[in-house]
Amino acid sequence: MQENNRGLISVIIPVYNVEQYVQRCLDSIYRNTYKNLEIICVNDGSTDGSLEILKAQTDERVVVIDKTNGGVSSARNAGMKAATGEYIAFVDPDDWVHSRYFEYLMRAIDGCDIACCSFQKICEQKDEEIINYHFPQVYTEEEAERIRDVRDKVWGRIYTRVILENMWFRNEIEICEDKVFNLEVFISSCRVAVVPLKLYFYFMRQSCISISCVLDPWFIHMGLSFCLLQE
């Protein structure tokens, strides 16, 4: 059964040289049962055919922003500035989402500031582990250290626009910018709903460098309240 569209979600996709993957990403969003979407594609100075693919989209919900290259933080900020939705979501252009991704997250976010889900990490050559959250109903401040996968990423979730008021990605940070962004969001003691279903598919390209970034001490003293929602 299709979800009653309760609010517009602005889906922000930073695009840079992903002509092989971006259509797959967009198609997965088009297939979603939740239709009240504003799909903001920010071309960050691509030198391949990515911009042409974006301009060829016929779905009226797509908004294309073309800008000079400034990095993923700059692209996401441009998308946030253009966003008109009550909710904000970030999807990377080489990833894709389940057809009920936005429906389930919208069901979960009632009374919360963020709703996130499980994800599957997929490499070009083989599938890797499936990440599933099995958390207690509520997390205390002392337990926040255990929830790295929730706090580390900006994809695989939706945010209320209110919680992101005056929040921006830092353009000067090129590595782990999503962790820093979430630090500043979570420090406001937000409430996060967790949907224990793998609804986001994180694609690891061989050309990408895997970087481990540890910001754990920054997060230990956050007062976070988590609730686990079952379908």
Image: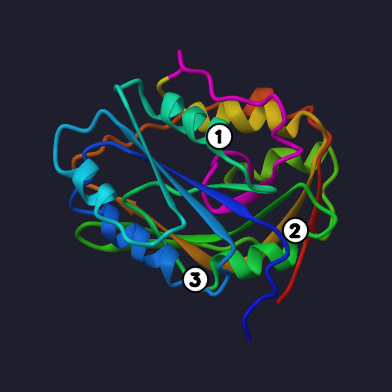
Q: Is residue 73 left or right of residue 141?
A: left
The disc at residue 32 is 3
Q: Earlier in the sequence, mark 2 or mark 1?
A: 1
- What residue sits 55% from the left and 42% below the top? 154
Q: Nearer the viewer, residue 147 or 173?
A: 173
Q: Nearer the viewer, residue 110 or 9?
A: 9
Q: Is residue 116 above or below residue 149?
A: below
Residue 35: give x, y in percent of width and height: 55, 68
> Which residues make up the magenta segment?
150-173
Q: Is residue 177 above or below residue 60?
A: above
Residue 102: give x, y in percent of width and height: 58, 64
Q: Amino acid at mark 3?
A: Asn
Q: Amino acid at mark 1?
A: Met
Q: Main secondary structure of the magenta part?
A: loop
Q: Nearer the viewer, residue 208 or 161?
A: 161
Find disc 2 in the rendering and name its residue. Answer: 109
Question: Tag 1: Cα neighbours inside 10 Å, few (<14), some, or many (≥20)?
Answer: many
The CA distance from mark 2 to mark 1 is: 20 Å
Q: Earlier in the sequence, mark 3 or mark 2?
A: 3
Cβ atoms at labels 3 and 1 below 8 Å apart: no
- What residue sits 28% from the left and 49% below the top? 54
The answer to if 163 sits in the magenta stretch is: yes
